[in-house]
Amino acid sequence: MKVEQISIFMENKAGRLAEVTAILKESAVNIRALSLADTADFGVLRMIVDDTVLADRVLKDAGFTVGKTEVVAVEVTDSPGGLHDILEILREKNINVEYMYAFVQQSGDKAVMIFRFDDVDGAVTHLSARGIPVVGGKRLYTL
C-alpha cells in the first residue's frame, strides 16, 4: 500500500508558504502531514493531503511546480524504541530511508510515520511480512 505525496518547489522567501496554504484553504484541501526542507534560495514542501488531484491542479494553476511521489505510511509503536524496531526490520533487507516525517495524528496506540524508501515495493512487502501495519491512502486521508 502506497500513499501519494505532493511536493511543491518554491522560493525561500517570506509569505510564499502562506500562498500555498491559502490556495489549499480556498479549495477546501486538508493538509494531513507535511515536511519543509530548505536551502538558501529554494525549498521543497512535501505534503499528504486529503485530495491530491485537486491540490495538484490548483497549485499548478497558481504557477507552482508540483510533483507527485509514492511514499509509505507505517504505524509505529508509540513507545521508546518503536521507530528503531521499524528501522532494524528495513536494515535486514538493506532498504534505505531517503526521508521521513510524522503524521499529524496518532492511530490508536501507534504513531504514523511517512517514509520515502529507495525500494518502495520491497519495503511494503517486507514490513507487511513482518506484521508491521502499512496504512493505505483511503484510511490515511480520514485519520
Image (tube, rainbow, N blue to C red):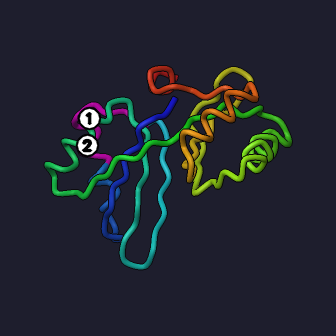
Q: Which residue is mark 1?
A: 53
- Answer with the quarter of the image where residue 17 lies: bottom left
Q: Position of residue 133 (x, y in %)?
A: 67, 26
Q: Considering the numbered disc 1 on the image, is that residue within a helix, a strand or a loop?
A: helix
Q: Residue at x 32, y 52 (%)?
A: 67
Q: Position of residue 121 (x, y in %)?
A: 54, 39
**Horizontal side of residue 76 vs 136, given as left or right:** right
Looking at the rendering, the stretch of residues picked out in magenta corresponds to 21-31
Q: Residue furthest right?
A: 80
Q: Position of residue 138 (x, y in %)?
A: 44, 21
Q: Is residue 42 above or below residue 20?
A: below
State the residue in front, 3 or 108: 3
Q: Considering the numbered disc 2 on the image, is that residue within a helix, a strand or a loop?
A: helix
Q: Residue at x 31, y 69 (%)?
A: 11
Q: Residue at x 56, y 53 (%)?
A: 118
Q: In the image, what residue type sits under mark 2?
A: Asp
- Answer with the quarter of the image where residue 5 lies: top left
Q: Which residue is mark 2?
A: 56
Query: How many other residues sit within 10 Å of disc 2, few (<14), some (14-19) or many (≥20)?
Result: many
